[in-house]
Image: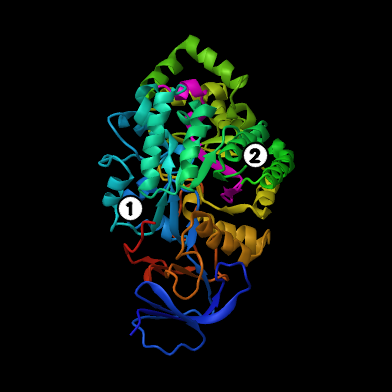
Amino acid sequence: MIDLLIKGATIYDGTGNDCFTSDIAIDNGKIIKLSNNIDLESRKVIDSSSLVVTPGFIDFHTHSEIYGLKDNYMKARIAQGITTDLCGNCGIGIFPLNENKEYLLPLNDDVLGHYDNYSWSDFSSYKKVIEGRMGINQAYLCSHAPLRIAVLGPDSGRIANKKEIDRMCALLDQALTQGCYGLSSGLYYAPCSSADRNELLALLRVVKKHNKLFCVHHRIEGPEIVSSIKEVLDLALETGVRLEISHLKIIGRKFGYLLDDIFNLFDEYIAKGVDVKFDQYPYHYGSTSLFSLLPAHVLALPRIEQMRILKDERERAIIKDEMLHPNGWESLYPVVGPDDISILSLDHTHEYDGLSLSQIGKIIKKDPLDVLLDLLADEKGAAVMIDVTESEETLERILKHPLMCFGTDSLYSTPIPHPRSFSATIHLLKDLVLDKRIITFSEAIRRMSSESATRLGLKDVGIIKEGMRADINILNLNTLAPTATLSGGFTKNEGVEFVIIGGVVAYEKGVYNNTLTGKLF
């Protein structure tokens, strides 16, 4: 008797090929047979004759590691058919840790969410914490910020010397040896923004030695984006490292015309031998820490010091001038504008949730920039924003590009996360693929499954075929609909009928079975 039999499936197998009809026999966590009219006795039979079957979705860019520690079942992932996460993106991560970890925690609280028990020191000891308590599969990158903080401590907002770079390289080498899939950096964010070319080249040579990935949130995503992308392409060209550009977008709706230059740059460096691709989340508005709008030298300070200088009249005047007239760094405040920057959640008050800086300014009769700095001056905890980053046209052109693979950029650090944290996969498939037909359904499934698996080197997921791990979604395309909203009203996504992880039904018609069959890759 086998564990599970799926009958009459219309299968999009993850390769990008046309769909086909077959039964699927599953036993011991694997797909053991694909054939019509399988006649095997099974403990459970699912009739999928009116449904569509796909591989479980692989999220190439997420920030779900702390969420997974708080909710081992990872319900927000499973309810949108995500069965594998790549964690540790944007240079923000949870290892390595040493006596300097207190300087990392405020950054992690903003993006990953608060967690009280950082009981590990490296990836190896972290694996012992999570193995056996994972609702979905996970793979990890080694993150740049913990490397810098472990070596530089409270002084991480400066250029590192040769000895310090060597120590970072040793920690990175250890993490990659222990099983991390590459290095991630967030060159836009402190403290990664303080890394110079010497540091980056040294770290990337370690990545190249292990034949792993360099995933990077590059320095500038607004009007100077072309030179910013060129910086990381040059690093990849010099070191030979495989490059993944994180959540490609152009911030500022009026700068969408730069997309042709970016695509031409990719072609130019691919012709030179650079292995470059990018991931994308399917929304024209983003979400990140509200503090990230501050100048880099302010971000590098401890939170208590940030609060002090934001309340100092003279210091504040200097910061305002820097933000309105940046020199040598990207200030998103004038690029996006206060009409398109809204409060998603503040720990110290929820009075302004959902309002833009301009709207708050009108209510309290203050300049929107002073509104922003007042809010940050009073915030000891997490502060998260929504910002309209690009036009719908730019989003769709990026989605069409053959180098694109899927990521959600999910955050779970606030009570009301961005809708992408709950409904990104379903929004993509329903609104952009089935309704707008930006790309074909089979191609979308490929980019959400086998494309990411191949990029990471995951051998047994991403395709529905015999011998593969049974990570499978069963969808009803007639009812498929995302339900997450900016007000946080998520219950479940419509049309997600079954999610199977490691051959076990984890989600069935809106019911979570609270399974822990996730695997650490």
Asked whether residue 486 is drawn in magenta, I would say: no
User: Which SS class for mark 2?
Assistant: loop
Q: Quadrant of residue 162?
A: top left
Quadrant where the N terminus lies? bottom left
Residue 520 image point, x, y percent: 36, 56
Q: Gap between marks 2 and 1, in whole Å?
A: 33 Å
Judge whether 344 appears above or below 458 on screen: above
Which residue carries the number 2 mark? 250
Of the two numbered discs 2 and 1 in the rendering, the one whose residue sits closer to the viewer: 2
Is residue 100 visible in the rendered image? The answer is yes
Please name the residue that numbered disc 1 is placed on. Answer: 71
Q: Can residue 374 be seen in this view?
A: no
Residue type pointed to by label 2? Ile
Magenta part of the protein: which range? 275-301
- Label number found at residue 517: none
Callout 1, which amino acid?
Asp
Closer to the camera in the image, 383 or 259: 259
Q: Where is residue 464 in the image (x, y as percent from the top left)?
A: 50, 71
